Amino acid sequence: MDKNLEELLTFYALDALTDEERELVEAYLIEHPEAREQIQELSQAASALPYSATPVRPSARPKQLLMERIEADQRKRSSIPNRSSHVRPNWLENIFWGSNRFAFGALSLVIAALAIGWVVILNKEVSRLRGEVSVLGDALLAQARSLEQINQSIDQLNAELPQQPPSAVRTIEFNGTTVQPQAYGQLIADPNSTSAVMVVTGLAPLQPGIVYQVWLIQGDTPTSAGLLTVDADGQGVLLLVSDTTIGSFNALGISVEPEGGSQQPTGDIVVLGDL
Amino acid sequence: MHPGNDMTLAQLSDEILVAHVARGDSAALETLYERYASTVLGISLKIIGDQAVAEDVLQETFWRVWRHAASFQAQLGSFTSWLFRITRNLAIDMYRQRSTRPPSLDTVDDGSEFDQIPDPTANVAEQAQSSLRYQQVRKALATLPMLQRQVIEMAYFSGMTRQEIAEATGEALGTIHTRARLGLQKLRLELEKQEFEG
């Protein structure tokens, strides 16, 4: 493999080459399949870099402007103008002023007579259709009145139904205690819901016979929310399900317990935080 | 738009949604926007550092998705790779137009301002998945030696060439090459260990 070009492969994967350098690499890749494999591996890592940026929820403005642009684009696409150039060909002049003009005149009279007959038939059809439109119009009016009555009933029902609180998903962060200060977690939950998702990193893998147990705490009373399994890197995800809403609890904790869990926390508290 | 259609669209994969967008389905584009707007804005803000301008880049990114959806080819890479590439290129161009010097990374993005304002449109499963990816990548980057991480972030988030990085750091070009290569290789191995799915 060309040593000079090999040095460019990493920056090709990072999309950080000049245009000239990029063309050189792409030409090189066509000829050298082994280099393509190396690029693919490096690109896998480079493609993860965007996820290292902290996600930020945007204001309503960009979406509003975007959808307005799209709407305008859709309107523009649906109105395609018809344009034609008016070019009178020579054969048309021959028909009007050439030797066949008398035959053309007779043919024109026949066509005119047929056209008049066709107009009479069409007028009768138009009258019939006007009658049908009138009948349909009356039916539409009746349906509009029914719809209005239905809408009024819906409004009345809505006024009688209890108001439901809007969804409000929150993300709450937790840190490890002095026992495991490197631990870190996030609880993603709607306080009005009875379920939540917990994502944890940095917990030390446990020896056989002991487990991590998650607790939801109300006042001084902990309630078990499940056992958390972590992988060799100390990462774990747990779906918490509770009998009462998540918002009814004021704290969350994780402790080390004997295998199978405990009725109450008995071991070291490794994560603790307020909800 | 009926609620039933919203739920159906939210269940579709990115690639199928892009195909819908290519056929002029604005609801499909709206679904992709809801799915990735926060990540796109985060990338843009990291590069530009100005929320108002970053939101302009966000809008322009999805406008380009709308206009060029038909040119997306799933066999060449994932939708997110395509989307984030558009974002990065737009953000770097925007930054260069506003500044004569390449952007620096003096302001460290340590994730301490993770948005916790309630989002009534949030899909809990998608948000959990996004949170996991974010933690995995940041943890993997944290295992890199600082100088390797610096070179990679300067190349990716600042759009600096090798020569510009060498000049900014005062290091030889060969040193920059080595740090970038070793850093990306280590990043790949760390992400593999964490079973990262992009």
Image (cartoon, rainbow, N blue to C red):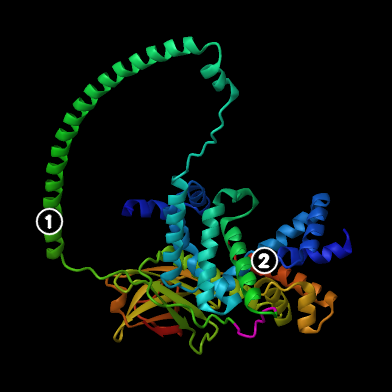
Q: Main secondary structure of the magenta part?
A: loop
Query: In the rendered image of this protein, does residue A170 appear above or below residue B63?
Result: below
Between disc 2 and disc 1, the foreground one is 1
Residue A208 visible, this angle: no
Residue at label 2? A46
Q: Residue A230 placed where, x, y %?
A: 52, 71
Quarter of the N terminus of chain A within the rendering:
bottom right
Q: Is B104 one of the magenta-colored residues?
A: yes
Label 2 – label 1 distance at C-alpha: 58 Å
Counting residues from the start of the chain, the first of labels 2 and 1 encountered is: 2
- The amino acid on which the numbered mark 2 sits, given as a three-letter code, is Ala
Residue at label 1? A152
Residue B145 visible, this angle: yes
Q: At 49% from the left edge and 84% from the top edge, which residue is drawn?
A: A176
Q: Residue A216 placed where, x, y %?
A: 35, 78
Q: At 44% from the left edge and 65% from the top edge, which residue is drawn?
A: A65
Checking the image for residue B178, the label placed there is none
- Looking at the rendering, the stretch of residues picked out in magenta corresponds to B102-108
- The amino acid on which the numbered mark 1 sits, given as a three-letter code, is Gln
